[in-house]
Amino acid sequence: MTPPLLELRDITHDYVVRHGIFGTRRRVRAVDGVNLRIGKGDVLGIVGESGSGKSTLARIMLGLLDPSEGAALLEGKPVSAFPRRGLAEKVGFIFQDPYSSLNPRQTVEQIIGYPIRLRDRGSPGSRRDLVRQTMEVVGLPERFLDAYPGQMSGGQRQRVAIARALITRPGLLLCDEPTSALDVSVQAQVLNLLLELRKDHELTYAIISHNMSVIQHMTTHVAVMYLGRIVEMDRSERVFANPQHPYTQLLLDSMLTVAPGKGIPELRLDTAAREAMRDHPVHIVTN
């Protein structure tokens, strides 16, 4: 059996919070016993409402946060064993907001080339050539080399962010809501670009989103998070065709549709319903 590219084993993470200056400290569990495997070439979608633990899990995958318990493994080695720059070469990250994640005082060449400039790789000329090549891969014309983010559209900025993540040729890309800040008219372009890059460059993705339509379009596998736990994980086609957990069913019921007469979903989740979902057996299929 081929070992996974990334594996999380019994990951738990607690935050210590305090209410007020003199308030007592207490622990809040953000991630609770999460296990998942991402094989090479997979596209794993991680879905759930705000506060479900998705962002904490992403920070653990990136090595920015150590789990309270459990182990995160990249290529069979603990993520914590990699030096920060070495890990950044293997795992790229695409931020949610292309407006705030790019330095407005830097040119496109400076932004995309920063990861290789930080590692002091090659001459300035060779680094510029590599930036040009990466821009071509993501569909950015060379004329944008000396442009600033403020001179570009949202879709163009996100292509800059994707190019920056790709320039070190990582095997795994972690995407945090990669289209949520974009106009609907350009969302499909960015998603299709990511799919093309996966095919052409043998990339593996972990995509964090609350947009079930994006997850359905992009992923091979889905992990559904609720209250810090994965309550359902399976191949995407099976999850969308026959969801097993009531929380997954709720997420799918919340999807907007263009079908006549459907209107906007109106979902209500009271305390009793939440308790029932928390106690419902999880559904995990790993193949």
Image (cartoon, rainbow, N blue to C red):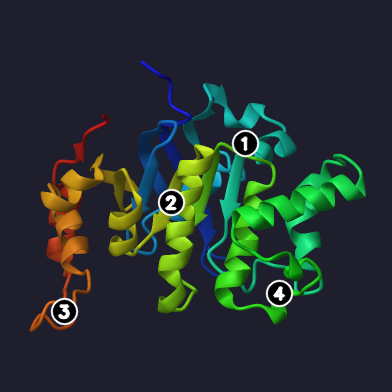
How many residues crowd mark 1 within 10 Å: few (<14), some (14–19), many (20+)? some
Residue 43, position in %: x, y?
39, 43
Mark 1 — residue?
90
Numbered tag placed on residue 149 in the rendering: 4
Residue 122 lies, with reference to residue 256, above or below; the image says above
Q: Nearer the viewer, residue 79 or 41?
A: 41
Mark 3 — residue?
266
First in sequence, mark 3 or 4: give its number: 4
For the residues marked 4 and 1, what is the alpha-carbon distance in whole angstroms?
Answer: 26 Å
Mark 2 — residue?
195
Is label 3 in a helix, a strand or a loop?
A: loop
For the residues marked 3 and 4, what is the alpha-carbon distance in whole angstroms?
Answer: 38 Å
Q: Is 65 situated left or right of 229 in this image?
A: right
Whether residues under marks 4 and 2 lie with C-beta atoms below 8 angstroms apart, the answer is no
Is label 1 in a helix, a strand or a loop?
A: helix
Q: Nearer the viewer, residue 212 or 34?
A: 212
Residue 225, position in %: x, y?
31, 51
Q: Residue at x 71, y 51 (%)?
A: 133
Question: Which amino acid is tagged 4?
Answer: Pro
How many residues crowd mark 3 within 10 Å: few (<14), some (14–19), many (20+)? few
Q: Residue at x 60, y 78 (%)?
A: 153
Is label 4 in a helix, a strand or a loop?
A: helix
How many residues crowd mark 2 within 10 Å: few (<14), some (14–19), many (20+)? some
